[in-house]
Amino acid sequence: MSQTNNPLKELINEGMWKNNPALVQLLGLCPLLAVTSTITNALGLGLATLLVLVGSNVTISAVRNWVPKDIRIPVFVMIIAAFVTIIQLLMNAYTFGLYQSLGIFIPLIVTNCAIIGRAEAYASKNPVHLSAFDGLMMGLGFMVVLVVLGAMRELIGQGTLFDGADLLLGPWASVLRIEIFSFDNQFLLAILPPGAFLGLGLLIAAKNVIDAQIKSKQVAPPEPEKGPRARVTSLT
Amino acid sequence: MKLTMASSPHSHSHKSLSRLMLTVILACIPGLIAQLYFFGTGVLIQLILALVTVSVCEAIIMRIRKRAIWPALSDGSAWLTGVLLALSIPPLAPWWVIVIGCFFAIVIVKQLYGGLGFNLFNPAMAAYVLLLISFPVQMTSWLPVNELLGKSIDLSQQLALIFNGFTSSGFSLDQMRVGVDGVTMATPLDTIKTDVAHGLTVSESMQNPLFNQWTGLGWGWVNLGFLVGGLYLIKAKIINWHIPVGIIAMLSVCSAIGYIASPGTEPGVVFHLFSGATMMGAFFIATDPVSAATTNRGRLIYGAFIGLLVYLIRTFGGFPDAMAFAVLLLNMAVPLIDYYTQPRTYGHGVNK
């Protein structure tokens, strides 16, 4: 789209919108669909993924010139696993409630394709500071989608927002809990996995609609006059 | 575009789409009357709610898609979806159940996929499954048939139950479901399943006043009503015979084998055929021309697998009835079935 000469701006655009890991690359769907039943869970997992992504991108970018090409994937996975272990132990220590409610999905961050994907596609080819920024933006893009999906599902499923935020942010955060409306019955579908698939589908559809509208608003630049092409094989 | 006359043969069906859909709706009437007789006028209230909701949803979506509203609405497909859904849910379910279901069927299952003719899944059944897994309590609260009811419920009481959740004298639906002898009544399929799980034999379970000699009280007549309507549809050439025959034959074979193998825990062929949604599913739901298989051989296979799944889920699964699940699962298999059952073009592809 916009070929800016500023790589940082380009990275922001890539991570948050144009190449968003959740909405466009559709990577890391397993945690995306499994833990987004509330905002708190989504935010917790989003933060964990963000930290792992930044850490692994920086480390991989730093060692990229010493890793032989043939064994790069095992090396990347080991680095990612190390960061996931750090995050897991930290969450176990400081946010135990959330650690329990996320359960297996914290160690499963290792298998999140978005992380190994960025390591392979970006960090192993670019300098450290750009890789760090790329990790931050990709992680943020992933986290925003997680949180929006979590908000949708929590709102439709139980009519609340930020339920259980104190598990993540400490005791003061229990005041964040907002009850928008209350039902006698939960709308179970929104909380069950099918609700996550439906919600993600609607989000992707919304993104495509916005993209189409932006495209239709842009005035197409006048086509440069082309001379008659003599041969099809020699593309100019 | 230049319109050229192709070579013969030309055949023209004089059935318009709206005529077709309205005939199917009319063919529901025998089943509807049976439901009205045994389960009270709540069915009519649900029917009106459903028709209003599907019309509003369809109109709004057509408006958003910048299409003409009346042609889409008057083809009757949305109304048929509403009617089928209203006939499948418990007559005294709260009003928001049917409203959510109709919204989901029309907006998500039908229109988001491109409208009539493009939906992968049967809208009414997808909505039914949505409701069943979201609101299991409301969706299984069938009243026992009228003659077993401890307290009679008139129209105003039914309205109060549907819109408020309580009758004017303060009874909830759960209290109304308690039968003459003070025992909560479930549907016949559910009762058999629970009793067998508790170690009773089927003939012991059938002593329950819910049953007559063969099948559930009232339910047999409802199924018979849909059977009559379905036979009319076949005679009027609205639907082909392949799908219903496939379903009924397969279900009969499976339940006969089951009955022979284990007569104590298997209710037998007649019970399976005239319980729950068998007839309605076989003639009205599985035959949806958009989401069903399109070749004749494919239709037989499609129907047979639905019958098999209905039997398997009813007997071994977690839910008492299975028509909706079976139809949705086979909707997914339709492209595959169609691919492998392409009829041979005359003069081509002769077996060597």
Image: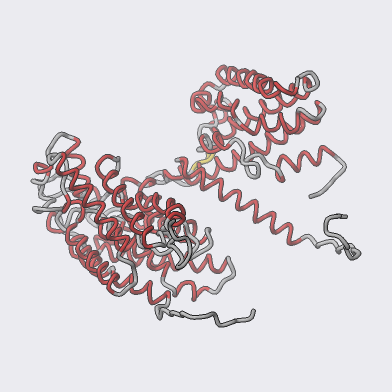
- Would you identify the image quadrant in which residue B198 lies? top left
| Residue A91: x %, y % from top left | 58, 21
Q: Residue at x 48, y 46 (%)?
A: A156
**Residue B155 in view in this figure:** no
| Residue B348: x %, y % from top left | 48, 64
Q: In the drawing, does residue A221 fall left or right of residue B29? A: right
Vertical placement of A68 versus B341: above or below?
A: above
The front one of B69 and B241 is: B241
| Residue A205: x %, y % from top left | 60, 52
Which residue is the extreme one toward the front?
B352
Q: In the drawing, does residue A181 fall left or right of residue B276? A: right
- Looking at the image, what colour scheme do you see? secondary structure
Q: Residue at x 79, y 18 (%)?
A: A66
Q: In the drawing, does residue B145 fall left or right of residue A66? A: left
Q: Residue at x 74, y 21 (%)?
A: A59
| Residue A199: x %, y % from top left | 53, 47
**Residue B7 in view in this figure:** yes
Vertical placement of A13 versus B150: above or below?
A: above
